[in-house]
Amino acid sequence: MFSTRMEQRNGVTDPASELAETNLERLKNALSESDAVVIGAGAGLSASAGFVYDGKRFEKHFSDFIEKYGFRDMYSGGFYPFDSLEEHWAYWSRYIWINRYADAPKPVYDELLALVKGRDYFVLTTNVDHCFQKASFEKDRMFYTQGDYGLFQCSEPCCQKTWDNEEIVRAMLDRQEDMRIPSELVPRCPNCGKPAAMNLRSDDTFVQDAGWYEAAERYALFIKRHQGMRTLYLELGVGYNTPIFYVLRTSRNSKINLIKQQIQIHSDIISNNYEEKRCA
Ligand SMILES: [Zn+2]
């Protein structure tokens, strides 16, 4: 773990709380010296808020599916080719409810909002669990690029539209029996009648609706408006394989200083400065 490496530096052991406090101060200083902040958030941020996809949380909600299929975690079970749509949606309605409509177990997103509230911020995220919205980040300051568990789309798709699923997902949850929902609850496209699908980017059927393009435009304008100003790019819960700010990593002829932040359990913010060379 990164924190362990830092604690063992020069043979000196720092108390974890002192380290977190120091890093939080550094982040606050960086924020106060910035004209704007762009938060790039990945799955790790929601994991730190308690949205974990395996272990006890998985067993609590999916014990019957685990027993029948031997699933090891929620995510991989979501790819299983169930025999019927009734069983598929019995699984997915639980998945959607606990990861999209239920509140996060820990207030990580609220604490993050407290840090940036009143500042000129924008959120760019691959997360589809609505945590930023639920924590009351401003809607016009967010672009969730990969979809939303709370939206359905046509599986074809016959149109570039999405629709809210809260009401029907609640009904699927309430009325499922023996790992199946009633057939009349199987969601269908209101336009063509074909089965509905999750609005998640997994292949080229992903629907980018009008809201998606409006958010993309707002993000582009935000970046344009802050050109030449001091913008803090804050990446949170993002692995090196899927960086949010990949544009920064692929632009030419410049160096950029970023602060790499990682929020870990108990909302400790672990950070290290690193100089990132842009490469072609
Ligand atoms: Zn359709």
Image: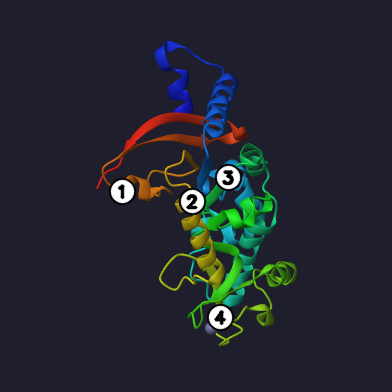
Q: Position of residue 64 (x, y in %)?
A: 63, 60
Which residue is labeled 4 in the image? 195
The circle drawn on residue 225 is 2
| Rendered view: 76 above or below 209 | above
Q: Position of residue 158 (x, y in %)?
A: 49, 83
- Residue most toward the top? 11
Q: Secondary structure at mark 3?
A: loop
Q: How is the image coloured?
A: rainbow
State which mark lies toward you, 1 or 4: 1
Q: What kind of residue is marked 3?
A: Asp
The circle drawn on residue 120 is 3
In space, the residues marked 1 and 4 are separated at their CA atoms by 39 Å
Q: Position of residue 169 (x, y in %)?
A: 68, 69
Q: Are marks 3 and 2 in contact (CB under 8 Å)?
A: no
Q: Is 179 situated left or right of 217 in this image?
A: right
Q: What kind of residue is marked 4?
A: Pro
